[in-house]
Amino acid sequence: MIPESVKKIKWEAFKGCCNLTSVTIPESVMEIKTSAFEGCPNVTIYGKEGTKAERYAREERILFESLD
């Protein structure tokens, strides 16, 4: 889980983490740069509906699971 204190996930932050299967992104994250999860083919993003996490997952075609 990413801490609530995080506001931004930078470019290629998790690039190449091919064993990463899930990440919970809190509502505090307002920006996720393109390619933040590049090379993570099995990742699922967990977060609240209507947040940047959901929008990013849909834009990048990453599986999203709602915590609502």
Image: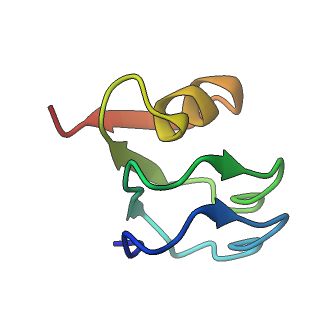
The residue lying at 57 percent from left, 37 percent from top is 62
**On screen, 36 above or below 63?**
below
Relative depth, front residue between 40 and 13: 13
User: How far across and down, in percent of the image, does residue 3 sit?
Assistant: 38, 76
Relative depth, front residue between 52 and 41: 52
User: How far across and down, in percent of the image, does residue 67 sit?
Assistant: 19, 40
Tell me if 48 is positioned left or right of 63 in this view: left
Relative depth, front residue between 21 and 35: 35
Quadrant containing the N terminus in the rendered view: bottom left
**On screen, 15 above or below 28?**
below
Tell me if 10 is positioned left or right of 43 in this view: right
Tell me if 24 is positioned left or right of 8 in this view: left
What's the coloring here? rainbow
User: How far across and down, in percent of the image, does residue 27 sit?
Assistant: 39, 48
The residue lying at 43 percent from left, 48 percent from top is 45
User: How far across and down, in percent of the image, does residue 68 sit?
Assistant: 14, 31
Relative depth, front residue between 25 and 4: 4
Q: Quadrant of residue 9?
A: bottom right
**On screen, 18 above or below 57?**
below
The residue lying at 44 percent from left, 55 percent from top is 28
Q: How many marks?
A: 0
The residue lying at 50 percent from left, 41 percent from top is 53
Q: Residue furthest toward the left?
A: 68
Tell me if 43 is positioned left or right of 7 in this view: left
